[in-house]
Every structure is written in C-alpha cells, then in structure tokens.
Amino acid sequence: QKLKRDAEAYLGEPVTKAVITVPAYFNDSQRQATKDAGQIAGLEVLRIINEPTAASLAYGLDKKSLETILVFDLGGGTFDVSVLEVGDGVVEVKATSGDTHLGGDDWDQRIIDYIADEFKKDQGIDLRQDRMALQRLKEAAEKAKIELSSVMETEINLPFITADASGPKHLQMKLTRAKLEQLTEDLVERCVGPFKQALADAKLSASDIDEVVLVGGATRMPMIQELVRKLTGGKEPHKGVNPDEVVAVGAAIQAGVLAGDVKDVLLLDVTPLTLGVETLGGVMTPIIERNTTIPVHKSQIFSTAEDGQTAVDIHVLQGERPMAADNMTLGRFRLEGIPPAPRGMPQIEVSFDIDANGILNVSAQDKATGRQQQITITASTNLNKADVERMVREAERHAEEDRRRRELVETRNQADNLAYQMEKTLRDMSDKVNVSDRQAIEDKIKAVREAIKGDDIERIRRAMSDLQQASYRLSEQVYGPSQQPGGNGGDGHGTTTQSTPEGEDVVEGEFYAA
C-alpha cells in the first residue's frame, strides 16, 4: 500500500495495475503470496516476473544481435545468478540458480560483530545486548560497508554509544577494506556455487558469456566485482546499468509491453524448480523440469497400483530431490469414481499448467470416464479469490483508520524506546543523580508508560516531550561540558584496529509414458 501511495504521489494520478518482480528462486507459494499482497493493496497484478529477467529486459532492449548474458544479482537478503539469451527483442531465460539466505545484510552483520567484539574486548561491554546501541551499530556498519566500496579505510565514530558507572563510552575505530574482505571471505565463496550451477544448467562455460550484468546494491563492493571478473575469465561487469534501478526499469518495460506501449519485446521466463507428483514408493516423479520456459502445459499418464482401485490421491510437489518426503508439498487432491479394473489398466492423465505469472494449476482426469479433478496451487497463503476480494474491500474501507492506527503504534514505539533509554540511563548513572532529580524523571517515565496504555496520541507526545526535556537537563548535569566525544579522559573510548584472527497418501500409480 505504501508503494502504491508513493507512486500515486509522484505521478499525480491513481495507480491501479502493477507488474511485480520477485527473486528468481521464489517458489510457487511465495509467488502466490506476492500476487495476493498486490491485490490486497488495491492493485491488479498484471504479471509476476523474475528479477534477473527484468534486469535483462532492461539491458536487452537495444541489443541487435543475439547475446548470452549472465545476471549476477546480490541484493540485501537474496542472491541469484541467471543466464539469459537476449536479442532482436527476445529475452529467454536459459537457467537460474541462487541462495535465498545470502545478501548484503550478511556483510553488515559481520561488521557489527567485529565492532561489538572489539569494543567488548576494550571496554568489557557487549553492545549487542543494548537494543538502542545495536541499532546505531547497524546503521554505522551499513555506512562503513558502502564507504569501503570507494575508499580503502573508513572511521566508525559513535559518541555516547553506552555508559557505565565511570561515565559515557564513545566508540571510535578504523575499518579497512582489507579487514572487511578478510571478515567476509566465506560469504564471497558462497557466491561461487550458484554461479557454476547456473552455467552448468545452461550447458555453457564462462567463455560463452558475452556480457555480465550486476544487479543489487551489494554488487558495488569491489570484492564482488573482482569475484565476477575471476569467474568469467576476466570479463568486466557491464557498468551502463544502475544496479539499484535496473529491475524496476525492466518491470516498467514489461508493463509497457502488456499495455501495448512497447512493441517487439518478447519475455520468455522459466520455472526455477522442478514440479511433479508423488508416485508409488514415495518417489517424486517430475512433470515439469526446472528451467522450463513458461507459460507451459505438460501431461503424463499414470495408472492404479492395486486391483479394483477406485480412487487416487494426487500429491503435488516442488523441488529437486528424488524422494517425495524431501521436497516441498504444494497441495493434495483426490480423483474418485474410477471404474474398478485390474491394476495398471486405468489411464489417469495428470496435467500441470503454469501461467505467465508462474502460478500452477494441476488436474487429473480418468481417460475412460472423463471424470476430472483439479487444483490451483495457493500453498501456504490459504487465500482463495473471495478472501482476497474481501481483504481488498476491507483495506479500502479502513484506509484512514489504518493510517491512524499505524501512527499510534509508531508513536507508542518511540515513547517506549525513550522511556527504556531513560530507565537505563538512571541505572547506569545512579551515583551521579540526586534524589529529587531521579524522582522527577521517574515520574515522567511513569507518565509516558501510562500514556502508552491509552489511545490518545497527543497525550503520548506531550509525555514524551516532557521526558525529553528532563533527559536534556540530566545530560548536562551528569556529563557536563568537559566530557565530549573523542576526549582523552579516563572513560576509554574503544579505539582499536586489532584483528581477530511419511505410505497411504501416495499416488497409487506406476508411470506409463503417454
């Protein structure tokens, strides 16, 4: 809803339709949930496409000859590599691979842990146990990571990061690019596996790659660019595309195609994981192999496993493992009314159909009677069409109420954080605050806590303002003008660059080629 509001504010007109991009390795349930979220926000979701596909769409528009492009996408929380062919307005995904638990946030966490460990070694205080200090650490770590993409060394300076009985503590240390690369060497190595897997699935070698496109802010790190050069045999990553905007540009181009505003572009996406059914013995029998271009329709003929069997249970799976139990269950349904016959005689056609959004429909039909059952995989979202429509109507009806509730919650959170910080300060500075001042501040903290229990947002804000004023007076009294960040007093401000080195529910069937 926020994205919709932001777009409307920028464009100055209502936004009712959207093309949404998702990480290439999103499974069916995640794609369905994304589509549901868009509809609940009041958007007609025209298409869901993979992020690397969108990136190549943006890049491939002006290509006149056929080229093979590798998209290296390292975002904040996910990583994927895709191999695509672009040319003459056609973008075809050949293969995709990735790691859904690797991204720029992991680099941030390594910096946070390094800073916290060094500060603890120097001051004996673990900043990760203080939520306010930890938030400042997170912001500083991300800033340092970004700066080290353009300079060799950066300084992290966080005054008044914490305090103990001896007074306030200031964090000040240097971090070099070399140290960051040492701390995150294993994260860089984790990028290699998906890279090689994507090339292997596409049946290509590094020398077959014509261009390398970087997507995601984390690809700005020199260590990542150097890795890409190394893996591609020295190819320089393409610098003509903004890694933060390229996916959005590709989505906009696809929206233009669907609206008829952009001509001569054809997008051929793929399914990232194999889809199949469980057959006799708990085996996963593939129907649609991974990296199959979508939209796609495929069928196979199965039969019964027992004499006189009149029903079969269809267990739909997604994954690459040979045994059903090791893969993800997308759904189950039952086909009944099969005429009794010897095992292996009935012919049951199981069909998988994936639309252009990557949403899966599965059907089973008894060829003799024409009896059929089908399912649209909505997986873990548990939202049918009526549920989605109801939620859209509720969202529209309660938009203003939701805004007020969100504002109240945010204000409560701010007040709670302020009260928490002041309580901590009083504990840490117990020997430096006189009784009357302590009582006055405790009364104001109590007033904030009481205000938070109610729904009067102005009361909460007034209580916060009173407490903040008391906080400023306390700071002046306790710290005084002599103790400033970076001073040389005995408070010791953490300056260091030291390194630390389940079978009943199976499809009772044997596979028979159609």
Image: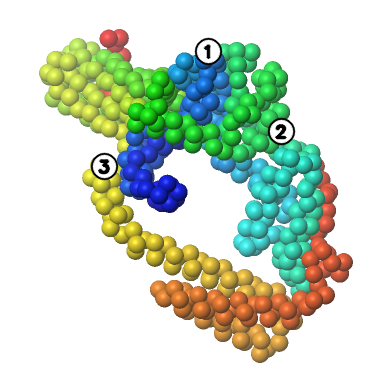
Residue 360 seen by the camera: yes
Q: Amino acid at mark 3?
A: Asn
In the picture of the structure, the residue carrying the numbered disc 2 is: 223
Q: Is 261 drawn above or below residue 420 in the view shown?
A: above
Residue 407 lies in what quarter of the image? bottom left
Q: Residue 95 location in percent, x, y?
A: 50, 20
- Say which of marks 2 and 3 sits in front: 2
Q: Is residue 6 left or right of residue 70?
A: left
Question: In what element is the residue under mark 1?
Answer: loop
The quadrant of the image that shows the C terminus is top left
Residues at circles 2 and 1 in contact by the CB criterion of under 8 Å:
no
The circle drawn on residue 65 is 1
Q: Residue 470 location in percent, x, y?
A: 63, 81
Which residue appears at 28% of the width and 46% of the height? Answer: 388
- Mark 2 or 3, nearer chain start: 2
Which residue appears at 69% of the width and 27% of the height? Answer: 227
Question: In what element is the residue under mark 3?
Answer: loop
- Say which of marks 1 and 3 sits in front: 1
Q: Residue 63 location in percent, x, y?
A: 53, 18
Alpha carbon of mark 2 to alpha carbon of mark 1: how far? 31 Å
Q: Amino acid at mark 2?
A: Met
Q: Residues within 10 Å of mark 2 (few under 14, many from 20)?
A: some
In the picture of the structure, the residue carrying the numbered disc 3 is: 384
Q: Is 393 drawn above or below residue 308 in the view shown?
A: below
Question: In what element is the residue under mark 2?
Answer: helix
Q: Nearer the viewer, residue 169 or 60?
A: 60
